[in-house]
Amino acid sequence: MALSHAIMTALLDEELSGYDLMRKFETSLGFFWAASHQQIYQELKGLAAKGWLAATPVPQEGRPDKIHYALTEQGRDALAAWMHEESRVKPGKDDLFVKLYNIGHGDPEPVIAELQQRKVLHGQRLALYEKIRDRHYRNPETLSDARKGIYLALSAGIRQERMFLDWCGEALALLSQLGSDQTK
Amino acid sequence: MALSHAIMTALLDEELSGYDLMRKFETSLGFFWAASHQQIYQELKGLAAKGWLAATPVPQEGRPDKIHYALTEQGRDALAAWMHEESRVKPGKDDLFVKLYNIGHGDPEPVIAELQQRKVLHGQRLALYEKIRDRHYRNPETLSDARKGIYLALSAGIRQERMFLDWCGEALALLSQLGSDQTK
DNA sequence: TAGCGCATGTAACGCGTTACATGATTAC
DNA sequence: GTAATCATGTAACGCGTTACATGCGCTA
């Protein structure tokens, strides 16, 4: 259950509403930990109930009222304790690999088409990540400790996209010669 | 819901029991799609109820009876149809990245320790995958269509592990200089 | 006037994990 | 005798997704 900790991490330096968090999870942190607004609102409720976050209603005019959430001391302690726990990794699942196991039987066309799409998609993501790196994270050694961590997450993202892109190339090259003579 | 399709894929060429499948998911296919035995047994029941698998009880002596599952024509059709659907990707979540976002506040030691563990772990996996490749998948171009697909999944695994390993190196190098002077 | 942005929620469902349960045979 | 292997299951819970719901203000 690390969504709660991701949320608390986002609240380390600033107070945010559920809506603000939702947008934060659409970029930066969200590249590495996806979450829908429904999940976020639920989680915020739970964290406030536990006493890890403090909720402050903020009346507004002309737009809906919002609720600001701030990390409490308890929340900070819980986060610090969590840093010492062993990380959980969910390997990440992708139908495409299962389909590859399947490719000997039947038409390989749709898989090839998907590989081409992926190539585009991962190329775009790679470009985005690299843009962010070039803008804000040149010269990693000179960054503050806090931003070194963020840089490293970004670097993992870049490596990941580049890797996938290369692999798409290999896969398309190998599969293009197939389909013509279907020896099985 | 692709576990069902992964199971059917495993049953393309052979009839298997739940137990057999469980072991298959501990290697090969399981590298890319993890599943516990509880999940598998449930899924098998569901697939048999749908008519996509045919269940045959196999009495045994000296050990518990088993149930063999075979793909039906309906099952084959469903699989073929699924090949044309767009793949779902679940990005895969890893606490470690969230922890990196957190590293400016508090002790970076546990994160560094985890990175060192990961380096070992991914090194081992890489070695395993490469061993398999060298044993069974040399010269990808000469493989049968069916085995080309499997080779490509394996290749993705190898690239992935190598990528992570490299990244661990970068991360450890960058973080080692930190912790001594904690300017924040 | 139609749609988007802001802002917050409820409800049902599906997938995955953890824990618990049984019971015989074989190997150390 | 103790553990591992074979073989199958149930039940509760947690996390994530999908669908549905409300309502104001601004822009095209």
Image (spheres, coloured by chain):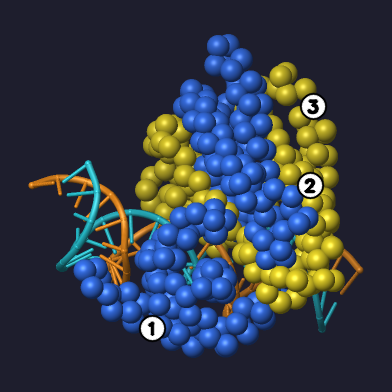
Chain colours: A yellow, B blue, C cyan, D orange
* Residue at (57% x, 74% y) in the render: B12
Q: Disc 1 designates what residue?
A: B56
The answer to whether residue A100 is visible is no
Horizontal and vertical percent position of residue A183: 75, 71
Q: Disc 3 designates what residue?
A: A138
Q: Residue A22 — which label?
A: none
The numbered mark, 2 or 3, whose residue comes first in the sequence reads 3
Up/down of A133 relative to C13, above or below: above
Same chain for marks 2 and 3? yes
Q: Is mark 2 on a helix, strand or loop?
A: helix
Query: What's under tag 1, amino acid-wise?
Result: Thr
Horizontal and vertical percent position of residue B85: 70, 75
Question: Pointer 1: residues within 10 angstroms few (<14), some, or many (20+)?
Answer: few
The answer to which of A84 and B135 lies nearer the viewer is: B135
Horizontal and vertical percent position of residue A3: 51, 49
Up/down of C10 relative to A19, above or below: below
Question: Pointer 3: residues within 10 angstroms few (<14), some, or many (20+)?
Answer: few
The answer to which of A33 and A41 lies nearer the viewer is: A33
Question: Pointer 2: residues within 10 angstroms few (<14), some, or many (20+)?
Answer: some
Same chain for marks 1 and 2? no
Q: In which quarter of the image is residue A160?
A: top right
Up/down of A99 relative to A123, above or below: below
Q: Which of marks 1 and 2 is in front?
A: 1
Q: In which quarter of the image is residue A40?
A: bottom right
* Residue at (52% x, 51% y) in the render: A90
- Position of A26 with respect to A89 (left or right) is right
* Residue at (46% x, 33% y) in the render: A83
Q: How far apart are marks 1 and 2 (CA)?
A: 44 Å
Quadrant placement of the C terminus of chain A: bottom right
Q: Distance between the residues labelled 2 and 3?
A: 24 Å
Query: What's under tag 3, amino acid-wise?
Result: Arg
Q: Disc 2 designates what residue?
A: A166
